[in-house]
Amino acid sequence: MRHTPLIAAALVLLAAGSGLHAAVLPEDRADVMYHRYDGGGVVVQGPSVLVRKSFGQSVSVSANYYVDMISSASIDVVTTASPYKERREQKSLSADYLRGKSLYSLGYIESEESDYTAKTASFNISQDMFGDLTTVSFGFARGWDDIGSREPTFHQSTDRRNYRLGVTQVLTRNMILALNYEGVSEEGYLQNPYRSLRYLTPDPNLYTTGPEIYPRTRTSNAASGRLRYYLPWRAAVDGKYRFYTDTWNIHAHTAELEYTQPLWKKWVFNGNYRFYKQNAADFYNDLFPRANFQNFIARDKEISTYIGHTIGLGASYEFKLASFSRLQKGRVNLHWDHLLINYDDFRDLTGTATPGTEPLYKLDADVFRLFLSIWF
Amino acid sequence: MKSSVVKASGSLLLLTLLAGATGCKPVQPWVKPYEREHLADPIMAMDPDPVSSAYMDHVYEVREAARGATGGSGGGCGCN
């Protein structure tokens, strides 16, 4: 019997829809995490609680509550503003519906702090096919941000659309490949109201500061590939690469390598290295020659040229919870990451020097994640 | 002469593609279910701890210009 590829694909989809071989919902579990970021004069810490529970054979619901408690005396605020403390809360809810080999997901995220509210609604569909060797997914998200500042009359907004495509492919009995694409389109107020740029005064030994002006649109494209491989001595190695480009003419490369090694039955250790490189946006400069030098003008280090390195180590210990009827097992996890960012064109203004000759800024930061996971 | 060779080659290519297309059988899984023991091992999970990976995505998203294609489904970072 012969089929055209189109009919074959249609039959596979039909079979998937009829529930011939049911895929599975994510596991029921609860995670309680304490996270801490400490670097560059900024400490951000707080809890994150994630609970996922299934109802019947085809519905799974998850909820997350996340808090950032921020204490900031970053290079940006000590040179042009005042240190501050802030709290950000994020709540999210998502529901997955499994039908055959299709998984439909709806999600909603709301993030709130005193001067910034972000709301995001998302939809995702994924489909297992070709004997469950391939999973194709498509996602769309829509976001609305409301931006304020310490100035009571200041009010701006941003509209965002995310388009996601993904393919996960089993290549061999030991190797999985994942390919992802995401396009993001934003319109509105895309800058930080607390940041400012600097430019030279008629006296070249002095500079003064002024307001930034960002474009009101930004469209980005990111594509990534990832391979995870099972090693013969029961360990896993994972390699990722992502290319990013946007309409501000920023190009970025991200590469990451991770190694996972289980030991002594209950322990799992892992280590990772991440490399990140980006070039500056077209309208970025550390020091402009004069005021109103160009239409769009900015000095945010996040859109400057730099290279970042991260090394990370993690350990987890799994334990059984046999004495509890509903709880199956638990795991304690501790991860530490060290970030080092070397800026190529963003200078440290905390000292005194002729404008444009200050030392280049470097950021060192430690990131900790301590969390308990329970499966039930 | 040259144009007829080009036409003939084009027709042959088209016929080959059509024959190939109509000859396709449904894709057979080349890794059978009973051969997926290693892939099912928890250490091979692409996202074993979503609470943790979502947090690290946020840490990077706040400090980097690049965003997206991480396989996650984050929203606005609220990071001014």
Image (tube, helix red, strand yellow):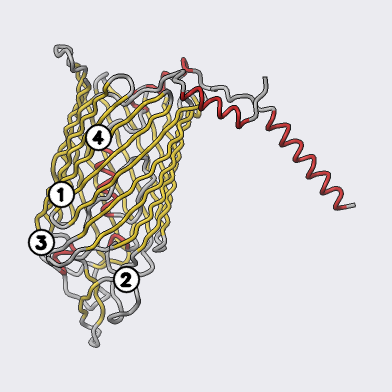
Residue A362 appears at what percent x and percent y?
24, 59
Chain that bears disc 3: A
Label 3 neighbourhood size at 10 Å, few (<14), some (14-19), many (20+)? some
Q: Residue at x 27, y 27 (%)?
A: A268
Mark closer to the observer (1, 3): 1
> CA–CA distance between discs 1 and 3?
16 Å
Q: Looking at the image, tell me whether mark 2 or mark 1 is earlier in sequence order.
A: 1
Residue A314 has which mark?
A: 4
Residue A285 has which mark?
A: 2
Chain that bears disc 4: A
Chain that bears disc 2: A
Q: Quadrant of the C terminus of chain A?
A: top left
Of the residues shown, which amino acid type is indicated by label 4?
Answer: Gly
Which secondary structure lies at badge 2? loop
Which secondary structure lies at badge 1? strand
Q: Is residue B14 left or right of residue A144?
A: right
Residue B21 appears at what percent x and percent y?
68, 32
